[in-house]
Amino acid sequence: MENYEKQIRSIAERLTGMVFDLLEISEEKRKWIGASDVSAALQLNFYPKCPEPSRAMGLAPHTDTSVFTILQAKSSGLQIFKEGKGWIPVHPLPNALIVHTGDFLHIMSNARFTTPLHRVMPNEDKERYSMAFFYSPPTDYVLSPSVAMDPDSAVRFRDVTVKEYIGIKVEKFSDSLAFIST
């Protein structure tokens, strides 16, 4: 587990650096990448098979409070909500990782990278195991929207620290991004 966490953290650091390059986020605002006070967590999940999956909820709809979530799953159950289409199943590929953006990248990219609403549904035939790695800046980091890629666009969110946003999300849950919108 320690080796896996080290490898997945390295992927998260490189991915964050590449996206920050694209967003033209300054060196000063990216010093936290790879630092010891970075917020990272590896979460192991188990969902038993369920004889009536339509009557159960594995994990309620939510967005992740992270820059990225990197997920390894061997069976289906993850679903992403797509406007106009409803819940779409995500079928994991063998030896592949599923990567999606979290609220923090949504804010820092000025909503250019959106955070997907997702849930996990139980499976009728199989148990589901997954490993989710959440990668985020330290709690005192100030999340600021970047408009460098499109200087004519309006800033969509006010600056907020990671700690403040987590508090807002605890209180407002699905309305947390709207609560910091400008």
Image: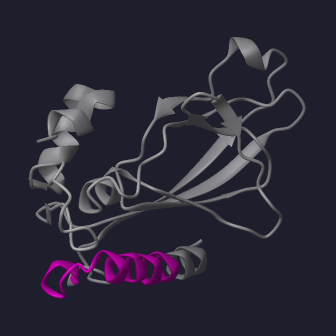
Q: Is residue 117 left or right of residue 88?
A: left
Q: How is the image coloured?
A: one colour
Q: Residue furthest front?
A: 152
Image quadrant holding the C terminus, namely top left
Q: Residue furthest bottom?
A: 27
Residue 67, quarter of the rendered image: bottom left
Residue pictured at 30% horizontal, 74% vertical: 23
**Is residue 27 within the magenta segment?**
yes
Q: Which residues are magenta?
A: 9-30
Residue 53 appears at what percent x and percent y?
76, 20
Q: Is residue 85 above or below residue 90?
A: above
Q: Is residue 100 left or right of residue 38?
A: right
Residue 3 appears at what percent x and percent y?
58, 81
Q: Is residue 72 left or right of residue 148?
A: right
Q: Is residue 86 above or below residue 108?
A: above
Residue pictured at 17% horizontal, 60% vertical: 139
Residue 112, quarter of the rendered image: bottom left
**Is residue 25 within the magenta segment?**
yes
Per the picture, the main secondary structure of the magenta-coloured stretch is helix
| Along the viewing direction, whichever of 131 and 113 lies nearer the viewer | 113
Residue 117 appears at what percent x and percent y?
49, 37
Residue pictured at 32% horizontal, 52% vertical: 111
Residue pictured at 26% horizontal, 56% vertical: 110
| Along the viewing direction, whichever of 159 and 34 lies nearer the viewer | 159
| Along the viewing direction, whichever of 98 and 8 lies nearer the viewer | 98
